[in-house]
Amino acid sequence: MTSVVATTGQRLRSFDVLRGIAILSVVAFHTAMVTPSTIAYVNSFFNLGKLGVQLFFFISALTMCHMWEQRETEQHRTAKFYIRRIMRIAPLFWLSALFYIAVNGTGPSYWAHDGMTGADIGLTMLFLQGFWPHAINNVVPGGWSIAVEMSFYLLFPLVIGVIGSRRRIYLGLAGLIFLLYYFGQQRLMVSMLASGVFGNDPQLLDSFLYFNFLNQCPIFLIGCYLHFAFRDGIGRREVYAASVFSLVGALIGHNFMTVAVGMSALVYLAVKGDLRSRLLETFGQNSYAIYLVHFIVAQLIGSVSPSQTGLAALLTRFTLGAIVSLALARLLHIAVERRIAPVTKWLIARIGRRDPQAALA
């Protein structure tokens, strides 16, 4: 029988491989946005890279469930969970926000036609930018996904505390939210456009409705479901339910539902098959910092050779962008993350000391 420790290590390594695939997919997508090739199917393939963010969400849910169970006997588990998540995400994100404000300024942008406001900056620093359209991506490029992650972290202890290991509830709740949000989306679009929040820009509204937490949170719920499915196995009824779920998505034109099911199947097979790659693990272990810096890296590469197009230019810029982003991520790890780790441990220890029983143990 495989030991729990061995299984844990294998699973976490598979998670890192999947994170590596996710971040390279995101880099590929953003590279193709500014440097499309002249071959249609290549552009379509690179366009799939945008789903790398949803792959991150799957792995995030799996990791949170996994670590929550590993720390089942830990004192003050919820408080320590929040400290670990905040200290993992906030320092680099805040530094990125200050950097992008300094580089890009506060002038008009796609997300805020009248320029960046103090409210946009404040909401971003509090990770609430995902609930306000003009702030969601205005301060930090791609900041919408960080807002979604932090919203999930906020709710996670409550969700897993109430639902526990009853995995079918996660799946059913994910389907219910998908359907309710989809059928209410058109009415929401009309009311929000009428309110003047988006001016007269339905494309901006459509982007916001895709990026916001309500649309994305079913991905996390499916990820929680997968965690318990790894442990207990998947029954035929769940396979049938997932098939129906995917079919409904295809019929109503809500492809995001179908993609969620297909991606969850790929994640399940990858982890069960103990997917390994040292290179992808390296990218996966540095994926958060890479995500934050790759936007400015792409901008710098584009400014050096702005007129390049075609397949060769796309592949060159993607490769160069991935390598440079990884190098910068490693520097950030040394300069910031290593320094944050002892502070996190100190804060965790302080919580333990406040417990009289823990002090006597």
Image: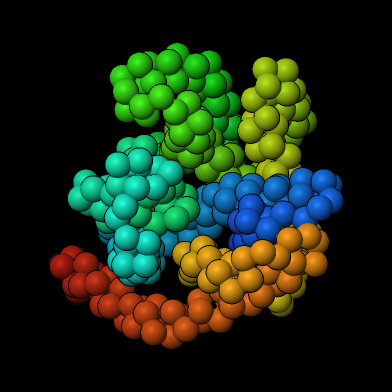
Q: Is residue 137 left or right of residue 181?
A: left
Compared with 202, 4 (above or below) is below
State the residue in front, 25 or 12. Answer: 25
Compared with 310, 237 (above or below) is above
State the residue in front, 12 or 200. Answer: 200
- Residue 174: x and y in percent read 55, 31
Q: Residue at x 46, y 34 (%)?
A: 204
Q: Residue at x 44, y 20 (%)?
A: 189
Asked whether the viewer can see residue 60, the reply is yes
Q: Quadrant of residue 104?
A: bottom left
Q: Quick one: quadrant of the N terminus?
A: bottom right
Asked whether the viewer can see residue 345, the reply is no
Q: Residue at x 44, y 79 (%)?
A: 332
- Residue 114: x and y in percent read 30, 42
Q: Is residue 173 left or right of residue 357?
A: right
Question: How has the structure been colored for display?
Answer: rainbow
Q: Is residue 62 left or right of residue 161?
A: right
Q: Quadrant of residue 129?
A: top left
Q: How many marks are shown on the rendered structure?
A: 0
Q: Quick one: quadrant of the C terminus?
A: bottom left
Q: Residue at x 35, y 54 (%)?
A: 139
- Residue 222: x and y in percent read 59, 39
- Residue 93: x and y in percent read 37, 64
State the residue in front, 5 or 360. Answer: 5
